[in-house]
Image: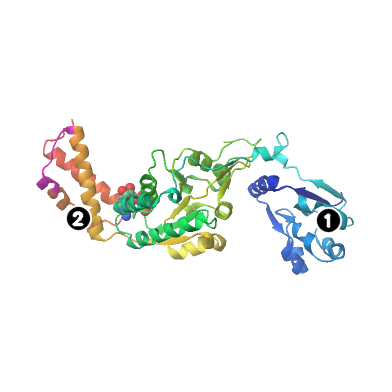
């Protein structure tokens, strides 16, 4: 069979690229190879498809094309933008035997059409870019009260948000992306919970935990499987975003992701939208995406691809809390629990008792706030039982 060139439209290109990505096949541009013919032999036609759109704009197209195409492996698949059809099908008439439109294979029963690509903005999501200045002030204040310690992050966050709000309006910054690193239990996930709450989120925060993903099927789990495949049709990220009411996505344990997911997020940050395997889109303009990870700064460089790293607006290493911040957390938690005890048991605890409980907990022993929290709970239970306020039988 002779060579053929397939023309794609902008719409079916997105779906095609997604599908190929899931099959482990990437689409590469011919541009690099036009500058270095030797590299052509490195192309793997099992995992790479060559997009030759850019060749349409070179000089002496027919002459150059007839020199370059014989160098490609006979099985290489070539595609090009439909807009170049006229010029390519004429000038490359000796390079290709056939010129056809690209049909996205698993969508044969329902070809992707423009109508299918619904660009849904997320109008019901409260976003940081939509707050007026007094709302923003309140937001920052309540956020700062919510998170203990992490002073560097807190002071950087106001600057980041201010800049994001301006450049988002100018159409230059679609998504604010933050990468939070650091040990367990220092407030990384809590930052996302706090932002969600402070934006006025009543529904569930849109959270994806890559710790729960098996690497084999991760992209399918995230963005759904193509029509005709067995498994969930809708990806988790779509379900989560649709069920949330704030412009925030939390990606927890991001280090557990694989290169396909890294590539996917690279696309998301570049284009400001999520695209499902069925080419459904949700516009994330104005959203914040928080990635969290327990890796160290060194591992961050090792594990996350440079392209993605450079796409992330801000990275921060969360440090263990200082004792004075832990004490604040302790006081807050104790008072919180006391409120609840009052509601549940009708027991009013005196200020002295509160102080007694606080004194019992040695905050310097804990660097993970989850452990500290557990200690606070245990101390309460003991106190309630020994003082006959609660009968465990
Ligand atoms: N800096 C912090 N400010 C307020 N609460 C915190 C902070 N760090 C930890 N916590 C508390 O500890 C719990 C665990 O913190 P989390 O943010 O989930 O940890 P991780 O850093 O592992 O994501 C949270 O539910 C929260 O109550
Ligand atoms: Mg966490």
Using the image, determine if residue 367 lies above or below residue 346.
below
Judge from the rendering whether residue 356 lies leftward or rightward of residue 205; answer left or right: left
Q: Name the residue under label 1.
A: 87
Dot 2: element:
loop
Q: Give the range drawn in magenta.
A: 345-354
Q: Quadrant of residue 96?
A: bottom right
x then y, percent, for residue 13: 69, 48
Which residue is drawn at the image coordinates 74% and 66% (left, top)? 39
Q: Which of 217 and 141 is in front in this view?
A: 141
Q: Which of 30 and 40 is in front in this view?
A: 30
Q: Earlier in the sequence, mark 1 or mark 2?
A: 1
Q: Name the residue under label 2.
A: 362
Judge from the rendering whether residue 359 lies leftward or rightward of residue 294; answer left or right: left
Marks 1 and 2 sit apart, C-alpha to C-alpha, by 76 Å
What is the residue that sits farthest to the top in this orientation?
Answer: 393
The answer to if 192 sits in the magenta stretch is: no
Judge from the rendering whether residue 284 lies leftward or rightward of residue 18; answer left or right: left
Using the image, determine if residue 109 lies above or below residue 301.
above
């Amino acid at each position: 069979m002779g060579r053929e060139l397939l023309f794609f439209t902008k719409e079916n290109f997105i779906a095609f690229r997604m599908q190929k990505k899931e099959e482990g096949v990437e689409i590469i541009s011919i541009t690099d190879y036009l500058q270095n013919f030797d590299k052509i032999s490195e192309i793997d036609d099992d995992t790479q498809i060559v997009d030759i759109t850019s060749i349409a704009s070179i000089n002496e197209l027919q002459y150059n094309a007839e020199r370059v195409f014989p160098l490609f492996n006979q099985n290489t698949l070539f595609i090009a933008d439909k807009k170049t059809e006229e010029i390519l099908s004429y000038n490359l008439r000796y390079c290709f035997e056939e010129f056809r439109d690209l049909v996205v294979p698993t969508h044969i029963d329902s070809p992707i059409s423009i109508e299918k690509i619904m660009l849904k903005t997320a109008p019901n999501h409260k976003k940081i870019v939509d707050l007026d200045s007094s709302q923003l002030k309140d937001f920052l204040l309540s956020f700062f009260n919510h998170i203990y310690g992490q002073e560097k992050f807190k002071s950087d966050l106001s600057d980041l948000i201010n800049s994001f709000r301006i450049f988002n309006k100018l159409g230059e910054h679609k998504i604010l992306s933050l990468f939070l690193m650091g040990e367990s239990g220092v407030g990384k996930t809590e930052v996302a919970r706090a932002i969600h709450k402070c934006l006025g989120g009543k529904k569930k925060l849109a959270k994806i935990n890559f710790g729960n993903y098996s690497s084999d099927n991760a992209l399918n789990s995230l963005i759904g499987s193509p029509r005709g495949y067995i498994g969930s049709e809708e990806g988790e990220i779509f379900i989560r975003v649709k069920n949330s009411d704030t412009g925030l996505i939390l990606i927890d344990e991001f280090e557990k992701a694989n290169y396909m997911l890294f590539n996917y997020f690279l696309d998301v940050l570049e284009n400001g939208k999520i695209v499902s395997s069925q080419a459904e889109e949700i516009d994330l303009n104005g959203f914040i995406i928080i990635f969290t990870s327990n890796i160290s700064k060194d591992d961050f460089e090792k594990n996350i691809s440079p392209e993605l790293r450079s796409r992330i607006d801000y990275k921060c290493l969360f440090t263990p809390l200082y004792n004075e911040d832990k004490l604040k957390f302790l006081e807050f938690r104790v008072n919180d629990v006391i409120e609840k005890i009052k509601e549940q048991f009708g027991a009013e605890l005196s200020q002295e008792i509160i102080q007694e409980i606080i004194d019992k907990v040695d905050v310097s022993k804990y660097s993970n706030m989850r452990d500290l929290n557990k200690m606070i709970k245990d101390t309460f239970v003991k106190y309630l039982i020994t003082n006959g306020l609660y009968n465990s039988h």
